[in-house]
Amino acid sequence: MKFHKYFYSISIFCLLFWMPVLCAGQSPKKQIVDKPNIIFVLVDDLRWDAMGFMGRYPFLKTPHIDQLRKEGVHFKNAYCTNSLCAPSRATFLTGMFPQTHGVNTNQEGRELNPDKTLSFGQILQGEGYETAFIGKWHMAESNEPRKGWDYWCSFPGQGQYFGNDLNINGKNIRNEGYITDELNKYTLDFIDKNADNPFCVYLSHKAVHEPFTPADRDKNLFTNDLVPEPESWLDNMENKPTWQRTVLNADQRRRLREKDLAKIIPQKSRKPAPWPAKTGIGKQKDYLRSLSSVDDGLGEIYELLKKKGILDNTIIVFAGDNGFFQGEHGLGDKRLAYNESMRIPLIMRYPKLANSNLTISEMILNADIAPTFLEMAGVSIPAQMQGKSLVPLLHGKNENWRKSFLFTYWTDLIYSIPRITAIRTEKYLYSTTPDINDIDELYDVVNDPAELYNLAKKPEFSKIESQLKKELEQLKKETDYKVEVQRPDAEFIGNLKTGKLLSIDFGNTNLSFQVENNILFQGVVLNKDQRSVSGYFQDSAISVIKNRPDLDPSKGTFVIECLVKPSSPDGVIASSGSQKDGWAIFLENGVPGFVVAHDKHLQFIDGQSNIINKWSHLVAVIENYNNVIKFFADGKLIGERKMLLPIQSIKSSTGDIYLGQDAGDMIDPNGVSVHTFRGLIQSVSFYREKMQDARFIELSK
């Protein structure tokens, strides 16, 4: 007996001694009792009306989504504040508008700052919830775990329908399965293991994003069904802004050059073809088929919650991140300030608070979800959250609820779509494009839900238009709208060298310099003129700088400076990479230019003056962090352009740097890449250095 007492005492001592050690490094969790569980299911690009109970597609069956609606509440007028994946997801997470949380585009690889813009996952985790993020994160293109989630399962970027590299709690695992089903399995496993304690799980599907790929079991659904024609399919777009009738061909979409775009004549009107009722547009049936597995998974989650006895103590929210055009106005994709783009599906089931089969008509935003979860969990809502909790509406209290909201779009990848600011009220939609000289759009969405008749500039609506303009400016002020939104995440350079990286002066280039820097000169003849000794390039002469880590153009501000005197009108002066990832300084018709390539998208800055037989100092700049390219010539800024591509789009694997011709993989095979440079190159220098434009101008003199 004494032994047992002694052992018991020692055990207690050890437990008390080791407990702080065991808990070290873990986020402290509060002890919580009787808190609701939270399950947030987000579907990618799901239209507000692409659910069986909506009746938009008579053949579409979504029994589990329909059951959720029947037993819960349908927010029939729910919207996103920006109709793109990353901005909308960041808004769902933070309850903040894109201009505030900083993730205002898809393609720049922007990432939330978890220390300044807390997600509902971070807050609930700190309040004792077991939290899980499963699926598409999309920001920063990385699948690495983020703060706020005890369990993490994600893939890089958009992910694939089959075959993904999943990061599960920091460990990369290859998963070859159909991603909708696989994500649902991970979700079920998390719920099963955490059913005894309050949990929050965010299931973020890739479906139904393109390429619309249904599960094998669903690929033959709706074969004999006809897709209803949208009313606005016949919209000829005559009364719409000119930019909406400016049609770019595939080459123009890939090779963005101002001088080429200026030659494009907008169509006078759109002439729609007959509606393809058997298929819809853009593999529309596959889009809807892809939803079937999402619905299956929702049913499995529902059954597990019932089995565990926690269904009615679990808040289930089903939503889409943004809308999607399916032929309206002849459009596909999203982005624009029309109903089909900005409107989203939103259903909630929580019988302790939300009556069954309830419909709420007030305007709801994706920014409202985070504060709603916090209030339902009994947690204080941070002042920085700009959304509003939906709890008062569930109690039938709609006093002081919003009567309008701000919709925004910043130019992103599709170069022909300009920056948009719009206001949506219960009766009107007013949309503007502040950066271009074009007409605005005004629609009476009550009497013209298809948004066919633009009322802007009509005398009888001038007073309403004036009022909406004023209210739009007020909403921009209230939400801290910015034309240029600062990145929220920190710039990462790592241990890469900064400052001047390498300088080749042909007048001082000796054999030891070549060997030390791994530089090859082939056919280059030294030439001395009145200026200095230079490298004379002709007859396919080249100089190759072998790829090396410090010349990685994908991080920081990468600068290429060269002093040249061309003798022929066309040719590549310096280049690296390919159409997949690359850059080039070139001559075309005697005029210098700079091009950046990514995934066969080329963005050009063209010079203005002919430099044949003249010495010219050229500086090309890639500001990776800001996604900006600049080009300077002889002390002048020639042009500046947003890359509209993912951060670090010029990959570190770009390869060797070539002087005198294209790097070999043809950055622009239909244009500048086919010409070799003829003339003199005195020097070429490379920098990784943040500089003011004045410094770049100084370099280029």
Image (cartoon, rainbow, N blue to C red):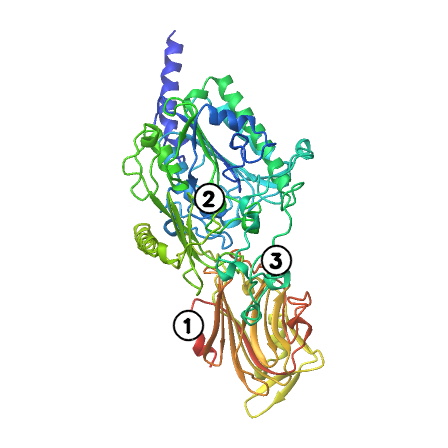
Q: Secondary structure at mark 1?
A: helix
Q: Earlier in the sequence, mark 1 or mark 2?
A: 2
List x then y, in percent, for residue 341.
49, 46
**Mark 1 surroundings within 10 Å by alpha-carbon count, few (fewer than 14), some (14 through 19), many (20 or more):** few
Identify residue type, mark 3.
Answer: Asp
Q: Is residue 187 left or right of residue 665?
A: left
Q: Measure how far apart labels 3 and 2 are at the Cα level.
A: 38 Å
List x then y, in percent, for residue 365.
40, 41
Q: Earlier in the sequence, mark 1 or mark 3?
A: 3
Which residue ends up furthest to the top in the rendered image?
A: 1
Closer to the camera in the image, 166 or 105: 105
Image height check: is 44 above or below 683?
above
Q: Measure how far apart labels 1 and 2 are at the Cα level.
A: 48 Å
Q: Secondary structure at mark 2?
A: loop
Residue tagged 1 = 693
**Mark 3 surroundings within 10 Å by alpha-carbon count, few (fewer than 14), some (14 through 19), many (20 or more):** some
Q: Are marks 3 and 2 in contact (CB under 8 Å)?
A: no
Does residue 33 appear in this view?
A: yes
Quarter of the image where one finds residue 236: bottom right
Q: Measure how far apart labels 1 and 3 are at the Cα level.
A: 29 Å
**Quarter in which the N terminus is drawn:** top left
* Residue 449 image label: 2
Does residue 179 appear in this view?
A: no
Residue tagged 3 = 599
Which numbered mark, 3 or 2, is in the foreground of this view? 2
Identify residue type, mark 2.
Answer: Pro
Identify residue type, mark 1.
Answer: Asp
List x then y, in percent, for residue 527.
63, 88
